[in-house]
Image (cartoon, rainbow, N blue to C red):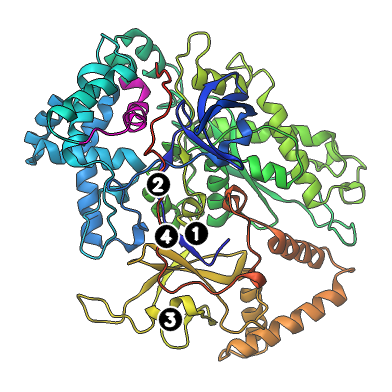
Amino acid sequence: MSDQHKVSKAKTKLTKGQVIRLDNGDYLLKEFLSKSEVLLVKLDDSKTIEVVKLSDIITAIVPADTSGQVVHDDILAIPKKDLKTAKERLKAIEPLLELGSAFKVRDAKIQAAKVSVHYNTLLRWLKSYNATQSLVSLAPRRRGWNRDKTRVDEETDQIINHCIDNFYLTKARMTPKAVYLRVKEACENANLKPPSQSTVYRRISRVPEERRLRARGHTDIADNRFLARAGKFPGADTILSVVQIDHTPLDIIIVDDEQRESIKRVWLTMAIDVYSRMVTGFYLSLDAPSTLSVAMCLSHSIIPKENWLKHLNLDLEWLVWGIPKKVHVDNGADFTSDTLRLGCMENNINLEFRPVAKPRWGGHIERLLGTFQQNLKDLDGKTFNNPKARGSYDSEKNAIFNFEALEHWLINAIVGYHHEKHDVLGVPPATKWSMAVYGELDDIPHGWPDLPSDPLSIELSFLPYERRTIRSQGIVWDGLYYFSDNIRHLIGAYHPETKKPKQFIIRRDPRNIKRIWVYDDKAKIYLKVPYADPSISFRTVWELREAKAYLKQLGQTDYNQSMLSRALSNMKRIEDESRKATTDARRKAQRDKNHKKSKTPAAFAAIEPVIDEKDATKSETRPTPQDEELWDEDIDDFDIE
């Protein structure tokens, strides 16, 4: 992971015609051969074909070009008045979004009259929003914001849209090649340079499935696939329409890595797709449930898991990813935090709270957690709910699982559960998911969920944040100083309107506070900034809090960074001496060890190798990342039906 990161809100579709970048070149995804294999054709040599596992190409997909469509920004960097404008624009286009595939340009004209804007403006907002599904994309673009030039001029863009609407999205069901020829002819008649064939094909592939089906005369199929059915959880009419999240302490005692002695129970945070009952993600921790637990669980749910499974040396398949439309949670403090609310808003996730005194609304996730709890009853170290059931069984004495072993057991249990017949569904969850994706029995193909082009931007949006000014000594957070050359150009910055010292957005992972992320709102990048003093050894926010509490017990309330560091050293010495004697000390030591070796979901999803902190080099102060245009050349014809 480099020391700077450009924010991206773009999404990528896993469809025919998508470009896949392998080690030996770029390939075109020609065909889905089965649920787990795809056929690839090399772009510069159509005679070269490859049959590969679907799981092997997930992180090799070339992101779609969203130049000119997408505002890539952190939601916290948007002024309140602009965020208010974005919400008003979303409200204006919501009736059009609800129409789905039934949407026509005349609908935009009718809605435009209601909200007193030109219908072309509504269409532009709709296009921007559909590119990212993020509220940020509707914020006004102001001077100083980066706005890439579009690859296709406005007149050509209008011709492409006109031909798709009037030739492809009709009951005549014209082929993509025929549509391209119409586009080419119209451009030549208008003395415009025709776009490449691949540009038109890509634009066709972006048409929502429901709209395509209805427009091309498959209304009955679209109704069967996309309309909600009675008697089910409200809104859970397809995959990722509703995801439920909850926590539970697992009914098993685990041991530490060093002494193999009891360190009590662990907490599990898990997410389930209500429609298919697939587990979308989880987070296992020795820490009590918190906003971080929810953030890591959501990130794990959204981001593909292939690299993570490889890192754990687990030869398993867990093909679930994508941003849910709605996340359903209870009313606990960890779910009602401002950080989670803003993260969901930024990623267009509707955060819905369980109605008070209506526990049945959370029944899906609670039953699932109960299923895994029941499976633990066959393991050594299991715990019991009452003394009679426990009898003479000593859970701590019989405990054999350490944290890593329990995590591996849980992953295997989840993947196994995916392939077991579900009593309510009548089929395994994996089959139900597959039916929605590919279309089987009475289900019509919905396609794979969009892939987030930038997993780290997803993860950062859910991390705790503060606002700080940047002075010559750097940034101070919780009494600790952070500095590096890559923020030197931000020192002493003033707000252009108020003329007061500018406050920058900074984020951190509580498990690793040795670095923070500083958001440069002009360059639209996050800058990774380490401790100003490399000798500072605090790794987690919990260590820092314990050091402050330790000094407070000694009667010291006025302390600096050096005193905090000495307090941490003294505490570790005391902890080492007592580790063998107490369960709490062993648990804390194991928790610290887990934090040190833990990696976030985005780290595993990264295509580039992760750079160790001590090997990271100094970054440029004004990075200028370039977006490569991948669709200039025509490709062989392929069908989109």
Q: Earlier in the sequence, mark 1 or mark 4?
A: 1
Q: Which residue matches tag 3?
A: 488
Cα–Cα span, label 1 and label 4: 24 Å
Name the residue that disc number 2 marks: 347
Residue bearing mark 1: 463
> Answer yes or no: do the residues labelled 2 and 3 have beta carbons within 8 Å?
no
Q: What residue type is labelled 4?
A: Pro
First in residue order: circle 3 vs circle 1: 1
Q: In which quarter of the image is the C terminus?
A: top left
- Can you see residue 536? yes
Give the extent of the magenta segment: 193-211
Q: Which of 300 and 248 is in front in this view?
A: 300
Q: Distance between the residues labelled 4 and 2?
A: 23 Å
Question: Residue 625, labelled with which disc?
Answer: 4
Is 624 or 390 nearer to us in this picture? Answer: 624
* Residue 539 seen in the figure: no
Question: What amino acid type should be assigned to the residue bearing mark 2?
Answer: Asn
Q: Distance between the residues labelled 1 and 2?
A: 13 Å
SS for dot 2: loop
Cα distance in 3D space between marks 2 and 3? 31 Å
Label 1 near label 3: C-beta < 8 Å? Answer: no
Is residue 598 a member of the stretch shown in magenta? no
Tell whether label 2 touches label 4 (CB within 8 Å).
Answer: no
Three-letter amino acid code at the position of disc 1:
Leu
Q: Which of marks 4 and 2 is nearer the N terminus?
A: 2
